Amino acid sequence: MTREEAILRMQDIGCYNPDVVDHAEWKDGKIALRTADGKSFDFPADSRLDDFIKADDVKAVLIGHRFYSPDILSLELSEGFDFGSGKITILSSKNCIVRAVSAELNDLRSAGCGICTFCREGGFQLAGIIDAMMKPGADRKQLDLAVELSEAMMTSCNCPLGAETALPVLSALEIFRPEFEAHCGKGSCPAGECSAFSTMYIDPFKCTGNGDCIDVCPEDAIEGKPGFISMLDEFECTKCGKCIEVCENDAIRFASGRLPKLPERLTKVGRFRK
């Protein structure tokens, strides 16, 4: 079945989603692209993406549903290069690749019709494997299973959506496998974005003791009073992030591994010493 035939079949059964399945097309030596922040531009053949996209901190580039290394920005791309949907997303060193793959899977699965077993069950299994990696205790052997499932979906699904769903997993694992292995084996997130591997604490040198974090904490996990450095109970904290949203001093931080020295009792602002 050709791609065109598969798309017609999707239209017949009512599961056709052009934003997910359609690929941007080259016309007269140009192709219309867009960035994740909404910028649109016409990209001519034999040009470089960094002529149009400026970014200082680039860890990965997501084009359509395929992950690339930062080198893709500086390569001359000829007519015929597959830009997928035409959407380009830049991921920085602060972005977790595993989390980005999970987000892609969720978007792609939501567009499925549920009729094709390989797409429906394969997508469900892939999402479960990747989501488990963002929590402690993930099994590194699941990486090989994710590759096996994705390769089967690339060739066995009834429409292009199944292959698109497998694409972010395969492309990310090909380039960024060490980051996946860090989540599974070391129980850490190199980007620091997965809060399950980190501990929240309040920086005693940045806290001004205004109490905003205390007021919004739904678990009463923060102790303090006006003019004193707030203290966070890591055992009560659920890492919901509400305190981070209201802290104007960027005093609430995440740490992987050992925490810095913190006050053992309520201490006036400016009085704490290492």
Image: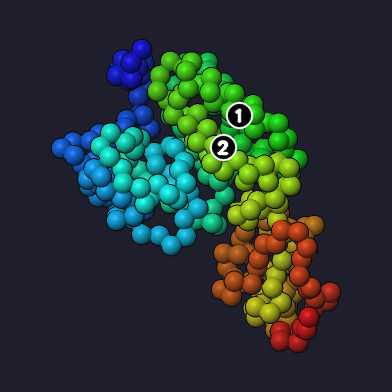
In space, the residues marked 2 and 1 are separated at their CA atoms by 9 Å
**Residue 58 x %, y %:** 46, 55
Q: Is residue 80 above or below residue 195?
A: above
**Colouring rule applied to residues:** rainbow
Q: Residue at x 43, y 49 (%)?
A: 71
- Quadrant housing residue 131: top right
Q: Which residue is mark 1?
A: 146
- The image's mark for residue 173 is 2
> Would you say 56 lies left or right of 127 here?
left
**Residue 143 x %, y %:** 64, 32
**Residue 232 x %, y %:** 75, 66
Q: Amino acid at mark 2?
A: Leu
Closer to us: 28 or 9: 28
- Describe the element under mark 1 as helix, strand or loop: helix
Q: Are marks 2 and 1 in contact (CB under 8 Å)?
A: yes
Viewer can see residue 220: no
- First-in-chain label (2 vs 1): 1
Q: Residue at x 44, y 29 (%)?
A: 164
Q: Amino acid at mark 1?
A: Ala
Q: Which residue extends farthest top?
A: 1
